[in-house]
Amino acid sequence: MAEKVTLVVIDGPSASGKDVLIESLANGLETRRSHFFRLSEDKLDPDRDAIKKARDIGKKRGGTGDREMAAVIISHRAQIYQRELTRLTQDPSPTTVLANRGLPATLAYQTLRGEVTMDEVWNNHQQQKIPNPNLVVITNCRPETAHIREESRNTIGSGLSGSVTRETGTAADETFRRRRNLHQNFRRVTEFLREKSLPVIELDTDYLTLEEETNIILRQV
């Protein structure tokens, strides 16, 4: 990846504060008059439904569908990054890319049920020649906090990540068990990526204010 493009991936469990942090970082970069681009795979992927279809195929084969989902997600990510980062490198100004989800989400969500390992996801990422982030930011909090936040916004189960945690027909106690395991898995992802020599900042959004979180990241960027 060209040196003038700095890729910052912001990730974490649903309702852990990822989206509000991205918005605050964008405002901070705008105040500094720094060039930035918000990259959202949800918005840039022309065939997001293919991921859920892949999960259904995997489940029909007797698995969880996580392996099939991971393969499609990573394939789509490679195409999005190739298209968008190539375009940004043609801009003469240095640009900070704020990526809403990325490699950490695939490592956390698709390995949760043990069908795929983190090493398999990592190796697939490298084989697809997807650039490693210059900085990974993981937002996390207590599962109870995330649940309350989602209930207050009425966003439970929304988006691709929510559909994995809260599959149709899943009982409430099973959904919360998955949520708890997911929050723990993101902590494992943090350590995994550090072992891969990637710079990772983990933010506990139960205790840090949004201003504190933003300043921590802006100092790094």
Image (cartoon, helix red, strand yellow):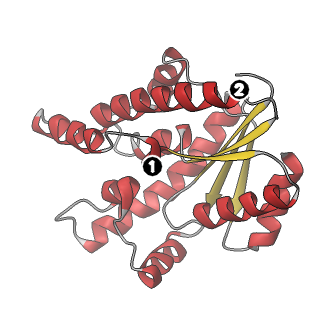
Examine the rendered structure and indicate whether residue 135 appears above or below residue 12: above
Taking 78 as reference, is 32 above or below it?
below
Which quarter of the rendering shows the N terminus? top right
> In the rendered view, does 207 fall on the left or right side of 84?
right
At mark 2, the secondary structure is helix
CA distance separating discs 1 and 2: 21 Å
**Compared with residue 145, is residue 213 higher up or lower down, i.e. above or below?**
above
Q: Residue at point 80% right, 29% down?
A: 92
Residue 89 falls left or right of residue 13: right
What's the amino acid at mark 1? Lys
Closer to the camera in the image, 106 or 183: 106
Q: Earlier in the sequence, mark 1 or mark 2?
A: 1
113 to the left or right of 188: left
Q: Is residue 124 left or right of residue 18?
A: left
Whole-percent x and y of residue 28? 81, 61
Front position in the image: 192 or 123? 123
Residue 171 can be seen in this image: yes
Question: Label 2 near label 1: C-beta < 8 Å?
Answer: no
Quarter where residue 192 is shown = top right
The quadrant holding residue 87 is top right
Location of mark 2 (residue): 89
Residue situated in front as seen by the camera: 150 or 178: 150
Q: Which mark is residue 43?
A: 1
What's the amino acid at mark 2?
Answer: Thr
Furthest residue toward left? 60
* Rendering coords of residue 196 (x, y %): 67, 27
